[in-house]
Image (cartoon, rainbow, N blue to C red):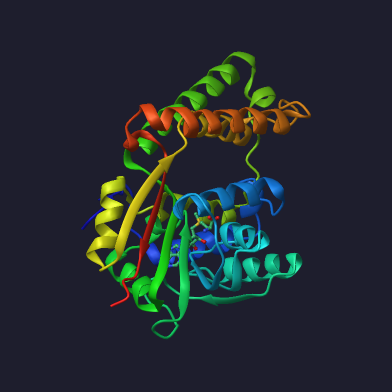
Amino acid sequence: MSAHVIPQDREPLDPKLANIVYHDWEADSYDEKWSISYDDRCVEYAVGRFAKALGGTPRHFEMVLEVGAGTGFFLLNVAQAGYIGQAFATDISEQMVKTCVANGRRLGIDVIGEACEAESLPFPDNSFDLVMGHAFIHHVPDLETAFSEFHRVLKPGGRLIIAGEPTLLGDAIASHFKRLTRLGIKAAAATLGRERVLATAHHAPEDAEAAALEAHVDLHIFTPVELERLALGCNFTEVETFTEELTANWFGWVTRTAEAMLAEGIVPDGYRLVAYRIWKSLFWLDNAVLTRLLPKDIFYNAILTAVRPLR
Ligand SMILES: C[S@@+](CC[C@H](N)C(=O)[O-])C[C@H]1O[C@@H](n2cnc3c(N)ncnc32)[C@H](O)[C@@H]1O
């Protein structure tokens, strides 16, 4: 196995079933939860990751499949910039596929959607010029089979791009920021009163059950070298990884954790715009300066790029 398996300190559940139920439940609120939009802000971000995987310059691909596409954040934003001919989206969650196709329709992008597992793609051999995945392979139980499927459905010379994967070390560091933020807010609640500080949970009992599955859907975490080995082991060539986001990621987790915990009215109007500007400055600092000075493994997000050989 070429990845770290996340230990499950809970009753083991079928990971595929957990992913289906959890992501079906999350599909309607997913974009809002993760601040996903289909405007310049997210087009710029998605195209930036896409370009990075292609050596800095984005280019057009005709037949493009995104696996584990969710609501379409990566596929639709790259498509809006004009780099995709025909877009295909698959996901193990039927609700995610429906949301992705509907988001595409709203944006005037024709998406052919199919609910299926990454380990068994319903497409003939040699179908796609590009297969991509964003923030998704850490959910897939059988990575070797999934990568073999990506290889099979790619045309010879076709490109694989896997982006938005948390790294082993980057994630461990980020978890301290999340924990410290939670502790700080709980201390404020203990001093100032829970009602004044903490948001009230809105989950109905059946929602709470689905929400609890979040603890069962993340199966793996990778170092950049492990990602490379995975692709090499499935006969890909021109395999390369990049990492990015350090301080921007810490800031992002602190603000997201605080937003989720704090009572309505505490966060001032205009906060989101200010937070976005700070995040953007830190993102620039990380990528333009810190990636040159610090080891690759401590950055949070990994991008893998590889090619199916011509023969
Ligand atoms: C964290 S979401 C990312 C969605 C989207 N790519 C994005 O970047 O916003 C992970 C997605 O992977 C899907 N998924 C989980 N396991 C899968 C599997 N075995 N095969 C295909 N999709 C899977 C989930 O249903 C979910 O929509």
Q: Quadrant of residue 172?
A: top left
Q: Quadrant of residue 60?
A: bottom right
Q: In percent of the image, x 60 and y 62: which residue is there?
A: 72
Please give the count of numbered marks on the rendered protein: 0
Residue shown at 57%/57% (left/top)? 74
Tell me, yes or no, if residue 7 can be seen here: no
x and y percentages locating residue 133 in the rendered image: 46, 61
Quarter holding the N terminus? bottom left
Query: Residue 217, can we see it?
Result: yes
Please state if 305 lies on the left or on the right of 45 as rendered.
left
Instruction: Give the side of residue 268 with respect to residue 275, left or right.
Output: right
Q: Residue at x 52, y 71 (%)?
A: 64
Q: Is residue 19 above or below residue 273?
A: below
Residue 191 or residue 309, whichever sits in front: 309
Where on the picture, by quarter, is residue 190? top right
Q: Is residue 126 left or right of residue 194?
A: left
Q: Position of residue 171 (x, y in %)?
A: 39, 38
Residue in the picture at 58% in, 57% down: 26
**Residue 252 at x, y percent in the picture:** 55, 34
With respect to residue 304, does 113 lie above or below? below
Q: Quadrant of the C terminus?
A: bottom left
Q: State whether residue 273 is above or below residue 233.
A: above
Q: Is residue 78 above or below residue 171?
A: below
Residue 73, image x, y percentages? 60, 57
Q: Is residue 190 left or right of residue 287?
A: right
| Residue that extends furthest to the right in the rendered view of this protein | 269
Q: Residue furthest top?
A: 191
